[in-house]
Image (cartoon, rainbow, N blue to C red):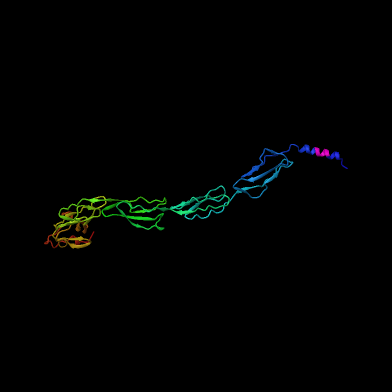
Amino acid sequence: MVSPVLILFSAFLCHVAIAGRTCPQPDEVPFAVVVPLKTFYDPGEQIVYSCKPGYVSRGGMRRFTCPLTGMWPINTLKCTPRVCPFAGILENGIVRYTTFEYPNTISFTCNPGRDDMPLALSWVLESRQRRSLVAAVTCPPPVVPKFATLKLHKPSAGNTSLYQDTAVFECLPHYAMFGNDTVTCTAHGNWTEMPECREVKCPFPSRPDNGFVNYPAKPVLHYQDKATFGCHDTYSLDGPAEVECTKMGSWSAQPSCKASCKVSVKKATVLYQGERVKIQEQFKDGMKHGDKVSFFCKNKEKKCSYTEETQCVDGTLEIPKCFKEHSSLAFWKTDAWDVKPC
């Protein structure tokens, strides 16, 4: 039988053997904190691990007690990022994100013409979804510029203009528009730049030499007034027959009258508007300014023919030097137009 004294002595020796054995500062666990955190712990003291905000435990122990051996048990705690629910689709806007794990963020952007209302809440990490309430951008009624009228305006909602609605203006008679006649309701709730209507006057048009001009019989000629031009016999109009007073205060063109050309060649076959014609018959009254014809010429070396073009310019018609007019008595000579082309 073991003596009680021996038992007490053995217990004393065991106490002495473990005296002074303490647990060290516990190992760090990613994204977790330890309470209490000290440099050493006496046997029997407890510590508690907890995941930091935004992270959640995925199994493993959380509470540990410092054992007599002074060695902490193996810790299998893992803290992983929380995953937020799908943010949803933003009506009239765009949601941008990479992942829904903490601490990532997402951004909400409204389409042009839409504004975030003050009630729109931030996306909450734990579980709530952001619900962005979106309202349409409106513009006040467009202000009609001076000397203008509102030609076309169809608001989308009653008398209210919404984003991208348009309004079209036109100026009163004698007034010219500077700027775009169409304005648009912008995403900022205002209209694009308004046009300006200005009174425009033009000087009386000048009569061309060898011609005439007609215009309205009134003391002042204004924007979009018209004048017509014409020429006397044997003269042709160089320019449009009708011109208009432009917003710059000048006429759209200044036509002139050009003289016709007398044909000095008595006999020749020429090309006129793609067809062969006898010049003395086609232009018996002369060629008008701007008319073009092509004369046939011979290439003696190659024994073939080619054409050179000439034009009537204000009374002058230059006959190509390569053209040779044959006498009516030289019946044995072949005209260039009857020779095969080169």
What residue is rendered at 80% in x and 38% in y? Answer: 12
Tell which residue pokes out farthest to the front in this image: 159
The answer to whether residue 30 is seen in the rendering is: no
What residue is rendered at 20% in x and 62% in y? Answer: 276
Tell which residue pokes out farthest to the left in this image: 329
Quarter occupied by residue 309 = bottom left
Q: Reply yes or no: does residue 110 show up in magenta.
A: no
Choose between 288 and 301: the one closer to the eye. Answer: 288
Choose between 253 and 336: the one closer to the eye. Answer: 253
Residue 333 in the image: state x and y as whole percent.
15, 61
Give the prevailing secondary structure in the magenta stretch.
Answer: helix
Instruction: Give the residues in magenta.
Output: 8-12
Count of labels in the image: 0
- Horizontal placement of 6 versus 41: left or right? right
- Horizontal placement of 229 versus 182: left or right? left
Choose between 342 and 290: the one closer to the eye. Answer: 290
